Image: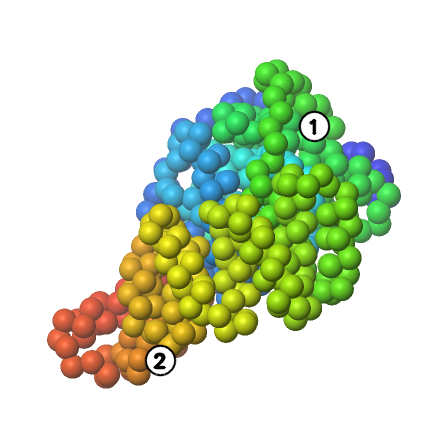
Amino acid sequence: MVYHCLKKFLLCISSASCLIFSSLSYADSQLPDIGTAGVSALSVEQEVLYGKAFMRFARASLPMIDDPVLDEYINDLGLSLVSQANNVRFPFTFFLVKDDSINAAAFLGGRVKVHSGLFLHAESESELAGVLAHEISHVTQRHIARYMEDQAKSTPLSIAGLVGSIALAMLNPTAGAAAINTTMGLTMQNSINFTRDNEYEADRIGMGLLANAGYEPSGMMTFFQKLASENRYSSKLPEMLLTHPITENRIAEARNRANSYKTRHRDSSLDFYLAKARIQAMYTNQEADSLIAYFDQNIKKSAPNTSAWLAAQYGKSLALMKAHRSVEAGELLNTLLGKKPDNLFFQDSLTDQEIDAQQYNAAISRLEARDQTMQNNPVITMNLANVYLKANRAADSIRLLDQYTRNNPESSVAWQLLAEAYQQTANQAGFHQAQAEYLALRGNIEQATDQLHMARANTADGLSQARIDARIAELEEQKKVDDSLKR
Ligand SMILES: [Zn+2]
């Protein structure tokens, strides 16, 4: 049965638009260029607003990986692809979710969810970039927005209601699919061609991004093919295969298209290997001992000082930390950092190790030196703020975090650290405000508002009070958006 399904559908990458049409099959045919004309009902502002609401729902319901190093990596990679795209209407954000399954999905407002399992299964950076490029193209080609506008014409659901259903489907695939089936079962049938065309278009546009950003255009298809053949005989298919089928024809077409680009090879970056090792060591449930054995084996298998070798050493250092063998981990990380002094993975993990060993001054002087040369780097800034805090230098921490949260208001980690720092200095108003922002990011508006009222009660400064009042009013508006989607 499974084999039969696979032969028929093969696979697709995940996206909200794929997801909606998961149960459909279709005949192959020529496809028109959909282009980007004719989308009117959803303004850029609305899409951005819905994208932010989606993030709040995601933070409240998904096991988010709030990891500044991985965050920086996935966003650098994603934005290198976005920079090649046309029709970019808003900034893109890529976020990681701890989930071993292979999946990635794009939402309105340039919000792209990436499962950690995608890293574990991608063998090259071009494969990972291929999946992201396809998802980015669903957004830039406005497939989801267009779908919603289309549906809004023929269902009693409002645009907000549709946005909410699709958000639900992406955050909780089983529940969401059911909700969509009952509300839109009939109208889905009208969109068969539309969806197939979307998929072809996302492949075609995505491959252009991939090639122009310097990755191997074949990365997209090699990843899908591998996924399909690995699961050919398995009884439990990954979600991505179940929900996002494509025909053999689609794979063939993408292969032909990849062949039409000049063949090129691109080595995966060191950071790609390090990201994989970090996810395996820190964001899977593998035990420390088995991780050490795994990375030891990889060290033996790889030639010294290659990216694979460095990543295996790095993975081992993280596994040693997990096994509470902090001293050995520190030695290893210092050696690695000696080879690559600017590497953020090494900088970050050595900081963790030094905090563990209470070597705060060593960490501070190293990070301060980096901060001079790599100004405003998020990873260095967050690490430095964290160590200041541990070293009871809350005022220095606040100085960094205050600036940082201004530029990165969606950083949960930064708000948490800032709250801790204000608590250390017994600044009640600051503490409650930082707590409020952290809660608001998770869509917990009522508690956030309570915190702001407490902040207001703890400040005598008129200007600060006015600012807090304005923020309370903003959060009320935010709640209206969230409620309209939940309806
Ligand atoms: Zn797709």
Q: Residues within 10 Å of mark 2 (few under 14, many from 20)?
A: some
Label 2, on which residue? 424
Rendering coords of residue 411 (x, y %): 41, 60
Which residue appears at 80% of the width and 37% of the height?
229
> In the rendered view, would you say 71 is above or below 421?
above
- In the picture, measured across the screen, residue 248 lies left or right of residue 355, that is right
Q: Nearer the viewer, residue 64 or 203?
A: 64
Q: Nearer the viewer, residue 175 or 207?
A: 207
Which residue appears at 60% of the width and 36% of the height?
268
* Residue type of the residue flagged with mark 1: Ile
Rendering coords of residue 191 (x, y %): 58, 37
Helix, strand, or loop for circle 1? helix
Q: Nearer the viewer, residue 408 or 373?
A: 373
For marks 1 and 2 on the same chain, the one whose residue lies earlier in the sequence = 1
Rendering coords of residue 85 (x, y %): 44, 30
Label 1 with label 2: CB-CB less than 8 Å: no
Q: Is mark 2 within 8 Å of ligand 1?
A: no
